[in-house]
């Protein structure tokens, strides 16, 4: 089953104007096109190879009432033959298979998040999502390229005890392979994770779940705020994270804080980064490495009223993993933020 990449991610929001303004003004996306339909309207945004569809209107109210602002569809670009194979595989395991109003085959994902299957197009340039009456924006033609170059991965929060089943589902239905796993124990709380990836490398899902045998923590809180399983964050790939964070922060993005002690220990862990650690400390960027190279990443606060979806910036200097130490640092940072807000 040939799943090539993520064609686009569709975000439902109650306030499309604010959501689009944050992504454009603060994060550097460009408005590419608009679509107006009977019960909803959408804006297509782009930056690098990333395509986001931001949608609002009465046709998406049920989702918003139950989950708040968040990702409703992760559309996958597939070979034509793969669409049939995926639909048959989903049907075989009892998962819903439907046809969208835009004519795309849609298979269930997790919670109320689905996967539209759209035709893969030759070449590397992303295309307009099919089936809608898009009107191109005048802004798209002369827009300067942003700092985001791609969508590195999508973090998906599932309920405790459902992690392996969700990973197995993606293996059976989408043909995604088990790439790695991690268990993080912080005090009385714990998080388990499994990363699944397409053979093409164009689709990477980081599945995370709370350990039901431990005390409730941030993932339990997310599941409650989100009304169940959902996309926790989108990780955007950048080529140079330090100036990107500075630019985004000037434009209004709020990032999670990391204590100074983290950077004191970083000096001991990574002597080869010693000259950069002052800059990393200044922008509160996390650093880790694996056998292939270094990884730099930082996480935003959620810009949405129910504190649901948030964003990550990630720079890879050869690293292929997800930063074992940084998974713990992220968990601790989100937990501090949660307790402070509470």
Image: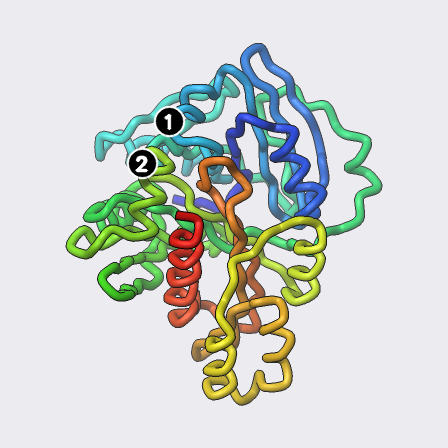
Task: Report the residue at 47% width, 77% height from top.
Answer: 261
Task: Report the residue at 37% width, 36% height from top.
Answer: 226
Q: Of 49 and 283, which appears nearest the observer? A: 283
Task: Report the residue at 22% width, 62% height from top.
Answer: 188
Say what secondary structure mark 1 lies in: helix
Q: Where does label 1 land, which residue?
A: 66
Check if mark 2's residue and mark 1's residue have beta carbons within 8 Å: yes
Q: Of 112 and 310, which appears nearest the observer? A: 310
Task: Report the residue at 49% width, 20% height from top.
Answer: 103
Q: Quadrant of residue 134?
A: top right
Q: Where does label 2 land, which residue?
A: 228
Looking at the rendered structure, which numbered label has been put on residue 255?
A: none
Q: Position of residue 338 (x, y in %)?
A: 40, 51
Q: Is residue 247 left or right of residue 332?
A: right
Whether residue 86 is visible here, answered yes or no, is no
Mark pair 2, 1: CA separation: 9 Å
Toward the left, the furthest residue is 213
Among the two numbered marks 2 and 1 on one chain, the one whose residue lies closer to the N terminus: 1
Q: Position of residue 131 (x, y in %)?
A: 57, 22
Give the answer, above or below, for where 149 lies relative to 119: below
């Amino acid at each position: 089953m040939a799943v090539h990449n993520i064609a686009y991610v569709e975000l439902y929001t109650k306030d499309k104007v604010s959501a689009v303004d944050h992504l454009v003004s603060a994060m550097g996306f460009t408005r590419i096109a608009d679509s107006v339909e009977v019960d909803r309207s959408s804006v297509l945004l782009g930056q690098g190879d990333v395509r986001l569809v931001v949608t609002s209107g009465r046709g998406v109210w049920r989702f918003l009432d139950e989950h708040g602002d968040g990702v409703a569809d992760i559309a996958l670009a597939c070979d034509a033959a793969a669409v049939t194979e995926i639909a048959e595989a989903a049907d075989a395991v009892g998962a819903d298979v439907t046809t969208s109003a835009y004519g795309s085959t849609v298979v269930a994902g997790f919670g109320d998040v689905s996967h539209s299957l759209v035709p893969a197009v030759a070449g590397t340039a992303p295309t307009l999502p099919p089936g809608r009456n898009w009107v191109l924006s005048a802004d798209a033609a002369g827009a300067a390229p942003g700092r985001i170059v791609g969508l590195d991965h999508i973090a998906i929060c599932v309920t405790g005890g459902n992690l392996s089943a969700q990973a197995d589902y993606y293996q059976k239905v989408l043909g995604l392979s088990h790439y790695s796993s991690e268990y993080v124990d912080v005090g009385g709380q714990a998080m388990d994770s499994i990363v699944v990836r397409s053979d093409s490398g164009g689709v990477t899902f980081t599945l995370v779940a709370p350990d039901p045998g431990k005390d409730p923590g941030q993932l339990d809180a997310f599941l409650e705020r989100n009304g169940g399983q959902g996309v926790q964050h989108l990780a955007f790939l950048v080529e140079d994270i330090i100036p990107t964070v500075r630019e985004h922060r000037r434009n209004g993005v709020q990032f999670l804080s990391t204590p100074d002690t983290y950077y004191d220990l970083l000096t001991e862990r990574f002597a080869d980064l010693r000259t950069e650690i002052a800059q990393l400390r200044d922008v509160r960027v996390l650093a880790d490495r694996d056998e292939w190279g270094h990884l730099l990443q930082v996480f935003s606060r959620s810009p949405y009223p129910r504190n649901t979806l948030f964003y990550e910036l990630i720079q890879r200097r050869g690293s292929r993993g997800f930063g074992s130490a940084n998974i713990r640092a992220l968990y601790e940072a989100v937990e501090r933020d949660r307790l402070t807000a509470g």
